[in-house]
Image (tube, helix red, strand yellow):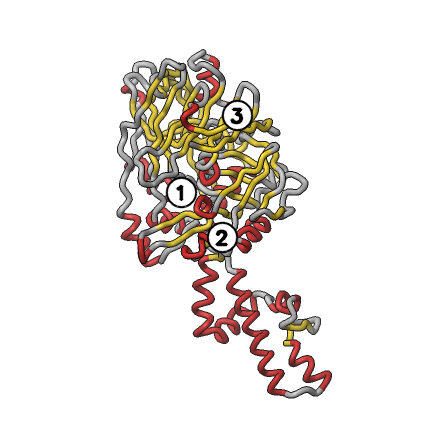
């Protein structure tokens, strides 16, 4: 998801600006509550910052979907962790907490279930000084809870304690809502993030501390027309409006045609089953037996198991950014790189499979050298083919290098000729055209094109999982039907 040059990281990180507050909210006669969203343009700044989180980011994602977090000091009451690297999440809205309302910018995240914001008692974490902080003494409706809470991630944790207060969403007031006051935010993720906190819209099954989610209380307190909410993301970068989240139903102006609904297969995340993937009009067989998938508004890209994502990126012509850089160096320093790296990897086994090298059981020798030994052929021919074998080995070394955060890039000029990628959901094919799954970063000569597909291996029992993030939800309006435990998709307007 991130490319760029490391030498630019510090000045670009310093150029981060906080999003302005004052997001539009409306409550119409149709009973729908609309929360305006603003879109953070995907830029080089965030991508370079995220590169600094290479290992941490992967750990956050893995823990978000597969591992566990705790509540309380004894660690006995454990819940599935619902935190990840939100650095690339692009859509934010505003809520208020307390009376009078203290404003916070949050991600409305269907992949988690807790509400947390920085606390005024957060004094030792630098990140807290860059965001709005909740001050309980300034609220007349604050109620003390005090139960400690931790949400673990790769190299540390966000920690704090539960409190209770009124939460304002649009023109609604959710009373007596439990939320986490974060007193420790050690990760660089939250230092450079554009948001203050996260409002989870997942099921209570993944709520840390088994806290009742905000969405549940909106339903239980009779604040909305129907137990449904929906997302519309405006993918038109030329327009200032980022989109809307609508509570109580769906705005017909946000979609075309009818929604296709699929049942939630496992509560926790908004998880369902999908059929096979198609590249162009050709079935891939990657999900011929069905795949588990999550609709996640807190994820920017489309994530899936590494072998499947590697196949998709290969078919659309994407390659790892590190692979491209490596190949450029190989062209000049190839033999030296090969001699330095060959002791740690064995790419020649792959080369033997494609016919350029032959294995001798302990290593690999070129097919031509083997033929010289066995058939006494011309030595010059052997040397020439030996060079082909070495070239193969070096190229594969580059291909095997992982890109930061699983990022892959494409030639921007090739986008018009790239194939579509489609997902089978219910009885319908949901197609993404290349201009919809490729993200453009930068302008003119500096423009780079990044694949919207990234690898994420979620271990059993939760995984393997696919995650349909904003790349998909921006093209297809998404309805989360809590009352009927189902998810619906329709062409976004």
Where does the image place residue 101, in percent across and percent down from the top left?
Answer: 29, 20
Q: Give above or below for 383 relative to 196.
A: below
Q: CA distance from mark 1 to mark 3?
A: 23 Å
Q: Earlier in the sequence, mark 2 or mark 3?
A: 3
The residue that disc 2 covers is 418
Q: Alpha-carbon neighbours of circle 1 within 10 Å: few (<14), some, or many (≥20)?
A: many
Of residues 438 and 349, which is closer to you in this image? 438
Q: Earlier in the sequence, mark 1 or mark 3?
A: 1
Residue 413 seen anywhere in this rendered image of the structure: yes
The residue that disc 3 covers is 203
Residue 88, labelled with which disc? 1
Q: State the residue at coordinates (55%, 53%).
A: 310
- Image quadrant of residue 89? top left
Where does the image place residue 53, in percent across and percent down from the top left?
Answer: 42, 48
At mark 3, the secondary structure is loop
Where does the image place residue 227, in percent across and percent down from the top left?
Answer: 49, 18
48 displayed left or right of 260: left
Q: State the residue at coordinates (36%, 25%).
A: 35
287 displayed left or right of 441: right
Of residues 298 and 184, which is closer to you in this image? 298
Q: State the residue at coordinates (32%, 53%).
A: 9
Q: Give above or below for 246 relative to 284.
A: above
């Amino acid at each position: 998801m991130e490319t760029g040059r490391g030498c630019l990281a510090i000045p670009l990180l310093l150029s981060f600006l906080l999003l302005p507050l004052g997001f539009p909210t409306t409550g119409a006669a149709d009973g729908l509550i609309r929360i305006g969203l603003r879109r953070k343009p995907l830029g080089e700044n965030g991508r370079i910052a995220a590169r600094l989180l290479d290992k941490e980011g992967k750990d956050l994602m893995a823990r978000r979907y597969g591992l566990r977090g705790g509540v309380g000091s004894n660690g006995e009451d454990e819940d599935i962790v619902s935190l990840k690297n939100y650095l690339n999440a692009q859509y934010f809205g505003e809520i208020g907490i307390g009376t009078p309302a203290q404003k916070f910018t949050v991600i409305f995240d269907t992949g988690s279930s807790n509400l947390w914001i920085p606390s005024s008692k957060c004094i030792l974490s630098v990140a807290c000084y860059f965001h709005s902080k909740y001050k309980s003494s300034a609220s007349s409706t604050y109620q003390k809870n005090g139960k400690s809470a931790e949400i673990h991630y790769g190299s540390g944790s966000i920690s704090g304690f539960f409190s209770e207060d009124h939460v304002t969403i649009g023109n609604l007031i959710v009373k007596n809502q439990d939320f986490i006051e974060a007193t420790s935010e050690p990760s660089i993720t939250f230092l450079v993030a554009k948001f203050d906190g996260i409002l989870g819209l997942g099921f209570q099954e993944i709520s840390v501390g088994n806290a009742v989610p905000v969405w549940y209380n909106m339903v239980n307190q009779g604040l909305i027309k129907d137990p449904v909410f929906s997302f519309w993301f405006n993918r038109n970068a030329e327009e200032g409006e980022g989109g809307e989240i609508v509570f109580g139903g769906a705005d017909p102006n946000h979609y075309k045609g009818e929604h296709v609904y699929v049942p939630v297969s496992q509560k926790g995340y908004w998880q369902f089953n999908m059929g096979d993937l198609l590249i162009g009009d050709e079935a891939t067989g990657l999900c011929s037996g069905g795949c588990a998938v999550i609709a996640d508004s807190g994820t920017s890209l489309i994530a899936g198991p590494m072998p499947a994502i590697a196949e998709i990126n290969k078919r659309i012509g994407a390659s790892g950014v590190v692979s491209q850089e490596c190949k450029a160096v190989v062209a000049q320093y190839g033999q030296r790189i090969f001699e330095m790296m060959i002791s740690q990897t064995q790419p020649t086994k792959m080369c033997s499979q494609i016919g350029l090298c032959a294995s001798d059981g302990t290593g690999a020798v070129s097919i031509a050298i083997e033929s010289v030994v066995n058939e006494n052929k011309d030595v010059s021919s052997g040397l020439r083919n030996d060079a082909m074998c070495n070239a193969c080995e070096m190229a594969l070394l580059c291909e095997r290098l992982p890109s930061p955060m699983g990022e892959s890039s494409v030639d921007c000029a090739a986008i018009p000729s790239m194939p579509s990628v489609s997902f089978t959901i219910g009885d319908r094919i949901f197609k993404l055209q290349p201009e919809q799954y490729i993200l453009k970063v930068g302008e003119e000569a500096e423009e780079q094109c990044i694949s919207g597909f990234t690898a994420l291996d979620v271990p059993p029992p939760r995984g393997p999982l696919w995650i349909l993030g904003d790349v998909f939800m921006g093209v297809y309006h998404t309805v989360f039907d809590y009352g009927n435990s189902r998810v619906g998709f329709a062409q976004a307007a």
